[in-house]
Amino acid sequence: MTISVEQARDLVLARCGVLETEDVPLLESLGRVLAADARSDIDVAPFDNSAMDGYAVRATDLAGASQDSPATLAVISHIAAGDYSEIEVGPGQAARIMTGAPVPPGADAVVMVEYTEAGEVSGSTGGTVHVMREVREGENIRRRAEEVSAGDVVLEAGEVIGPAAVGLLASTGHATATVYRRPRVAVISTGDELVEVAEKPGPGKIRNSNSYSIAAQVIAAGAIPLRYPILRDDPDATREAFTRAAAEADFIVTSGGVSVGDFDYVKPVLEELGEMEFCKVAMRPGNPQTLGSISGVPFFGLPGNPTSTFVGFEIFVRPSLRYMQGHTKLDRPRQAATLAHDVKKKQDRRYFLRARLDRRDDGALSVALSGSQSSALLTAAHRGNCLLVLPEGEGFFSEGSTVEVIRLDMEEGIA
Ligand code: AMP
Ligand code: MG
């Protein structure tokens, strides 16, 4: 039975569950999903502080102050960032203050140093200052608890932790963060023709590139690859590898061995050890996509051709791995773009062509195929930055027509 891309994706996701949580050092939380509300242990900012280098003043003292008629105030203290002064600023007085320093009692505004001129000097903090401008009450003061109050939630469970969130967690006392665990993904390449990357392939052999490209995609999806040794086209070896993978991984990905070749053992062994749900999806590249599970561990059998592997992972495995890590945005941004050249489509399957999206001089997004579309070749996937999606059915898409692309250069979310 052949099913649609959407049906297949729903079936994969239905087999996946969100993983348990773990506490990680703050910096390791980057890019991950917060699993519990994070509260602040203090007010942030912890105190009213100056947004500028200048003078802490009482706004009423500067009423009517101007270039021509400056107000002169007595400077009673000098407060640097990190200092704390309890000396009250009284009427007619000011305190020299630096950015980030606590606003002293009595002061209700800060006037920027640019609008002042030092008057007579006496001692290190004394003397006078001439102020050439009025200030509003509260001007240039950053209020205590403006970001968050002690005890309040600063980041909610489910939020993705970006660099700014790391900063917020740091300022609110979180040396660690509670996030969803990264899935451990068994990466198993099958094929008697495969040799290790360090080897020069002998007659009839090729290098096992899929193991690396899949592992790289696993890492890019935030998960941890467990690269297995090359799996020979042999039922016993296949049984052994799958059993081990089901015991130590949260997700199993294979490449190859799912066609109708004489030595394709992935499907029969999957059916024997676990369950197989489907193996054909109406898409190109990569019509034999195999879904199942072994002992409850989701299993996804990708086709062997390098580009089919690449696209199948992107469409089915990546969303699954993100889902397991607590992400709720599972779709890469989709956009409309103008086709830069004609494209002919012969098969009644959805095409995911390797393409490159560029911004034209007139501002429009233009998309062109990024190289040969043979599923055995990877260069077009490398040169491209998107998948050009052409709907089921035969068709001719002429230059200038509007088509849909999936942005591979952007994280899941809106475009
Ligand atoms: P299969 O699905 O096993 O029939 O493989 C389909 C095609 O993909 C064949 O041409 C294989 O040689 C190729 N292939 C399979 N596995 C790999 C791999 N790990 N790295 C690179 N090419 C592969
Ligand atoms: Mg094979």
Image (spheres, rainbow, N blue to C red):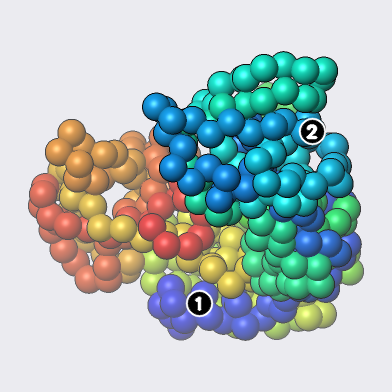
User: Which residue type does callout 1 highlight?
Assistant: Ala
What numbered label is drawn on residue 108?
A: none
Left or right: 118 as drawn, with respect to 133: right
Identify which amino acid the numbered label 2 is placed on. Ser
Q: Quadrant of residue 234?
A: bottom right
Residue 250 drawn at (x, y percent): 79, 68
Q: Is residue 342 visible?
A: yes
Q: Which image quarter holds the C terminus?
A: bottom left
The residue shown at (18%, 50%) is 338
Q: Earlier in the sequence, mark 1 or mark 2?
A: 1
Report which quarter residue 362 is drawn in. Answer: top left
Residue in the picture at 82% in, 18% down: 123
Can residue 193 be seen here?
no
- Secondary structure beneath disc 1? helix
Q: How dense is the environment of label 1, judged by Cα within 10 Å: few (below 14), some, or many (20 and up)?
A: many
In this rendering, position of residue 287 left or right of residue 240:
left
Residue at image mark 2 = 77
Between 300 and 22, the residue placed more toward the observer is 22
Q: Position of residue 335 (x, y in %)?
A: 31, 58
Residues packed near mark 2 inside 10 Å, few (<14), some (14 to 19) or many (20 plus): many
Label 2 secondary element: strand
Where 264 falls versus 341 (above or below)?
below
**Numbered badge on residue 8:** 1
Cα gap from disc 1 to disc 2, whole angstroms: 71 Å
Q: As rendered, which of 154 and 312 lies closer to the eye? A: 154
Residue shown at 25% from the left, 58% from the top: 336
Residue 180 location, x and y as percent? Answer: 77, 67
Residue 78: horizontal and vertical position, in percent? 78, 30
Residue 117 or 367: which is nearer the viewer? 117
